[in-house]
Image: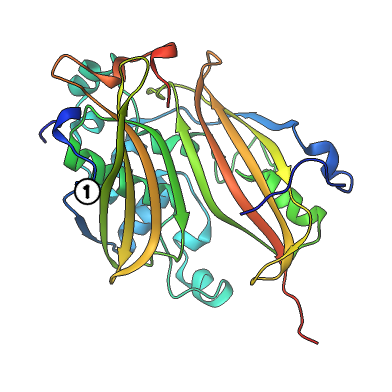
Amino acid sequence: MSQAYYSERAVGDSLQPLELAVTTTAVVAGAMATRDYSPLHHDYQYATETAGHADIFLNTIHQGALFQRLLTDNLGPRIRLGRLRIAMKRPVYAGSAVTVNGVLTHKAIDDFGCGWLHFDLELLVADELASSSAVSCAVPLDVADNPWQRRGEEWQP
Amino acid sequence: MTPSDASIDLPEPVAGWVGQLRYQRQAQALVAATNVCALCAAVEDANPAWWDSAVALELLGAEFTPPAMVSSWTRPELWRPDDHSEVMPLQLHYDLKAAFDYPTALVSGFESVFYQPAVLNDRLSSSQLLQKVSAEKTTRLGRGRFWVIEVRYHNQDEALVATEQFDCFGYRREVES
């Protein structure tokens, strides 16, 4: 996993998309990992017959983990998430093939010397938008910079 | 989402809830590596910060967790012998749905802001704040109110770990005459 630096990325750059098959086991595993015991994420009968869905579906934190993976796959482990907004349009059901992609919308260095990249991200199921996200993440300016070491006023998400 | 300003007349008990921190609760579980690895396995995330303690120590000086997992740590156990309360993770949302007698209430989106990372063995606490409630409005879903709830997460040292702001809409379908 290579590390990207602030100056290497330009507004308009696209991230290398992430493609993943969402299995029933993965939906349940994500829900249990995040301590989410809603039957919508593990009980097929409840999800379909009681709640009217097509199947069990990903919980919100699981979707956030997909967006987070897209960012670190593309930018490296030293990036630090500051702000994450997710708007859900439709459920991501078990059995879906998802594509997660994103584009850099703007970038800036704040008053404390922290480099910020802002992305619009999309989670697609069969080319239909399931969720959109706006993310701000801090990216190292150079090899000596590590956003995870920022404390107090040096961290302004 | 178009919540109105705070000057509208709200019925009690909702009016008294606006701006009040409620449901301040300490997590029953500690922040744990097993949950982090299980979630990363579910999304096939190979980021070494979540799998290799040496990388985490180099980055932060402690083994830490993906920021977007923050609400996981304060969810209640499915069952405990010493706690039979039925407080939901976003209980204020359900309180408002009941107070306005809306058959349906949904969360349309949320925004998380991440401050001090949660590290392994932290015990987080959460609290819920009703920021604002709109007047009744008619939308394509039905007639109802928008509301905004903020959940705040702190660690055991009272350091702010994250905030989550939820945009919600409670409503009833309108019957065409």
Seen in the picture, residue A154 relative to B151 is either above or below; the reply is: above
The chain under label 1 reads: B
Give the residue at x 49% y 73%. Answer: A53
Give the residue at x 30% y 15%. Answer: A149
Within 10 Å of disc 1 (Cα), the crowding (few <14, some 14-19, many 20+) is some
The image quarter in which residue B86 lies: top right
B112 sits left or right of B144 in the view: left
Residue extending farthest to the left is A2
Q: Nearer the viewer, residue B167 or B35?
A: B167
Q: Nearer the viewer, residue A76 or A142?
A: A142
Give the residue at x 19% y 39%. Answer: A10
The image quarter in which residue B1 lies: bottom right
Give the residue at x 25% y 32%. Answer: B50
- Residue B97 appearing in the image: yes
Residue extending farthest to the bottom is B177
Seen in the picture, residue A133 relative to B26 is either above or below; the reply is: below
B36 sits left or right of B108 in the view: left
Q: Secondary structure at mark 1?
A: loop
Q: Which residue is mark 1?
A: B44
Residue B31, horizontal then vertical, whole percent: 42, 28
Residue B124, horizontal then vertical, whole percent: 52, 25
Residue A29, horizontal then vertical, whole percent: 35, 52
Seen in the picture, residue A102 relative to B113 is either above or below; the reply is: below
Q: Nearer the viewer, residue A17 or B57?
A: A17
Seen in the picture, residue A3 relative to B130 is either above or below; the reply is: above
Location of the C terminus of chain B by quadrant is bottom right
Residue B112, horizontal then vertical, whole percent: 48, 38
The image quarter in which residue B170 lies: bottom right
The color scheme shown is rainbow
Three-letter amino acid code of the residue under disc 1: Glu
Q: Nearer the viewer, residue A16 or B51?
A: A16
- Residue A95 appearing in the image: no
